[in-house]
Image (cartoon, rainbow, N blue to C red):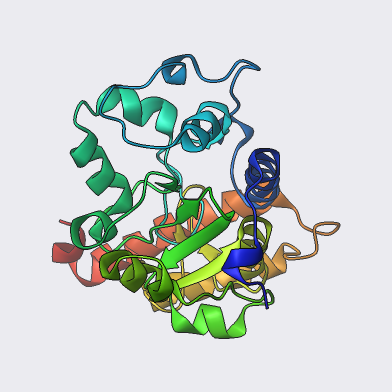
Amino acid sequence: MPFYEDLTYSHDETIKAVRDYHRFLMDLFLDDGDIFEPPDSGWPSLQTYPEDFNKSDDVKRLLRHLPYTRQTVEGGSNTRFADWSALIELNADFEDLMVDTEGFVALKGEVPPYVVSLTDSETDCPIFLLDTKAGVVYWPDGPGEIGNEASREQVTCDYYEWATDKEAIWRENSLAWTVPDFFEVLKDLFRKLDFVPVSPHEVDDPWNMRHGRTLLARSKTILREHGWPDLAAYDKESCVKALRQSKEDYWDEVARIDPKTVG
């Protein structure tokens, strides 16, 4: 079991893990145009930061060089990863930006400058917080089922020994993995179809079923019929087309049964 105190952060390893995860998502359902790669010198909009952007130098350097996903696509169930190259330009107020990305953790807890959100949070959306001191990703209030069944061991620590109570609470109540393990856990959720693409840009799961039990079940069947999770057999183009059609058909059926639902 990895202990927080024994871990270290790696800038290069973090970028490698994110880029590898993006390739995985493109193999599954995302379009190549949904991923944005920075120039060698980093994103032009992140060469300098607003004076009130109270994050560490490691965070600023990382955000400058991370690849990002299009904000209209989900990289996990109900999860949109933050595009910091755009967020910095669109948000003039640091506190508002932290609430937008760190969600309830920013409102109720204390997030140190060396921790940054990988997600662009909305109400009830997952929040992924990266600690650039130890190289750990936290999933505050993440589903216990995911933590219990994960193939990778979680990071452990007695946070109350050194953190303030407000900081220790959110860390203690989070799922937590090293950066490489965190993204492998997300991949496993897709492989097991606990995370289920239901369209070319949306992902659902059996715990929330935002798109309904029927569409979730149909999408799982479509993915399996097209070879998932065996990449050697998987026909992405045909599968994504079938997922798109399945969602359209589903909502047509819903509209016929109850027009008010889609009105």
- Please say whether residue 190 is visible from this viewpoint: no
Quadrant of image for the C terminus: bottom left
Q: Residue at x 56, y 59 (%)?
A: 136
Could you say where residue 82 lies in the image, as x and y percent from the top left?
A: 42, 41
Q: Nearer the viewer, residue 100 or 169?
A: 169
Left/right placement of residue 179 relative to residue 165 reads right
The quadrant holding residue 156 is: bottom right
Residue lying furthest front in this view?
161
Q: Residue at x 66, y 53 (%)?
A: 28
Q: Residue at x 66, y 17 (%)?
A: 40
How many numbered discs sit on the rendered protein? Answer: 0
Could you say where residue 143 lies in the image, as x and y percent from the top left?
A: 43, 77
Could you say where residue 247 lies in the image, as x and y percent from the top left?
A: 43, 58
The quadrant holding residue 103 is: bottom left
Q: Residue at x 36, y 74 (%)?
A: 208
Left/right placement of residue 125 relative to residue 62 reads left
Residue 106 versus residue 141 in the image, above or below: above
Could you say where residue 261 lies in the image, as x and y percent from the top left?
A: 18, 65
